[in-house]
Amino acid sequence: MKALAKILGFAVAALIVVALGFYFIEVYAPSPADPTLSAAIQQDSIPIGSMTREFLEYVPRDISLHAPLVIVLHGPLMDAKLMREWTGYEFDELADQHGFVVVYPDGYKHNWNDCHSKATFPAHTENIDDMGFVKGLIAREVAQRQIDEKHVYVLGYSNGGEMALRLALQTPEQVAGIAIAGASLPIPKDSSCPEQGSVPLLVVDGEKDPFNPIDGGRVTLFGFGYRGRALSAFDTAHTFAKRLGVTSAPQEIHLDPQKSGDPTSADGLLWPGAPSPVVAFYKIEGGGHVVPQPVFRYPRILGHTTTAVDMPKLMIEMFHISSK
């Protein structure tokens, strides 16, 4: 019995070592250093129906009247705090540089009620009023910060990107442009949203995204949690370009990584507009399910974080988000 107990003890210890090794190699991602900002991040909440919804807000110290608003929507199993970290605090720093307000909302039980009709997470199955939440946030920022309601922009990651797509489809009058990473339109058969509208769009997707297949198909979490089928990233971008009346072919560009040893690169398709592309799609060769930026390295289990594209900066430049 003592020998068996010793063997079992060694086996448990070995499993713990393997589990810890997997965590630190594939899952662990250290938080970036706190940035130097002109003001402090604030936590607040607003009532939406019978619920109280929470969010983080960053307002630069010298913000002007009628400044733009950027809303940043986190991915599944995340919250506002984590999304702020996983975008490298870059939106806060860009807000200081360009003079806009940033809001990071918290999803219901870490998810959003997007357009995937086959989704099984609580925000969808309980039909949470996330559209009302975003509308309420915009109204609050208009009332309290006097932001320009005609210049509201949304970046969404993964399930947050699907929520951004829902806003564009159903309330295009509320958002002037959206940017999505690791997200695509659901196929019509698997969509719960009437596809009515379109707005300028930035799409960034990894060629090796393990969740949202860049060429379209089944959306899962490593093969589990089936959420229906999606269009390809290209078809998502092309759909928006057609609805916006763009008939010319997109311009092709190539971007190399900015860091030695980075195995990724980016190929872009830019549908022309004035003064910037009205729709842009960046395919990250070798990239994963991430929001590319230069500060935060996503967990390896999600794939490579490219240095060829800085998505927050690219979004600000493409949509000309500035009050300065």
Image (tube, rainbow, N blue to C red):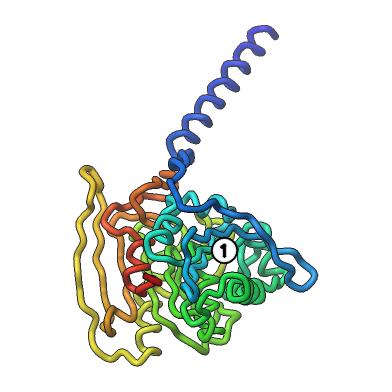
One can see residue 252 in this view = yes
Quadrant including the C terminus: bottom left
Residue 107 falls left or right of residue 210: right
Residue with the mark numbered 1: 226
- List the single residue furthest toward the top: 2
* Other residues around mark 1 within 10 Å, as few (<14) / some (14–19) / many (≥20): some
- Camera-nearest residue between 51 and 77: 51
Quadrant including the N terminus: top right
Q: Residue at x 53, y 58 (%)?
A: 58
Residue 249 falls left or right of residue 144: left
| Secondary element type, mark 1 | loop
- List the single residue furthest toward the right: 50
Q: Residue at x 49, y 58 (%)?
A: 61
The spot of residue 222 in percent (x, y) is: 50, 53
The spot of residue 208 in percent (x, y) is: 36, 57
The mark tally for this picture is: 1
The spot of residue 168 in percent (x, y) is: 50, 80
Q: Amino acid at mark 1?
A: Tyr
The spot of residue 197 in percent (x, y) is: 49, 87
One can see residue 116 in this view = no
Does 11 sit above or below residue 192?
above
Does 121 sit above or below residue 307?
below
- Camera-nearest residue between 14 and 292: 292
Q: Residue at x 70, y 70 (%)?
A: 128
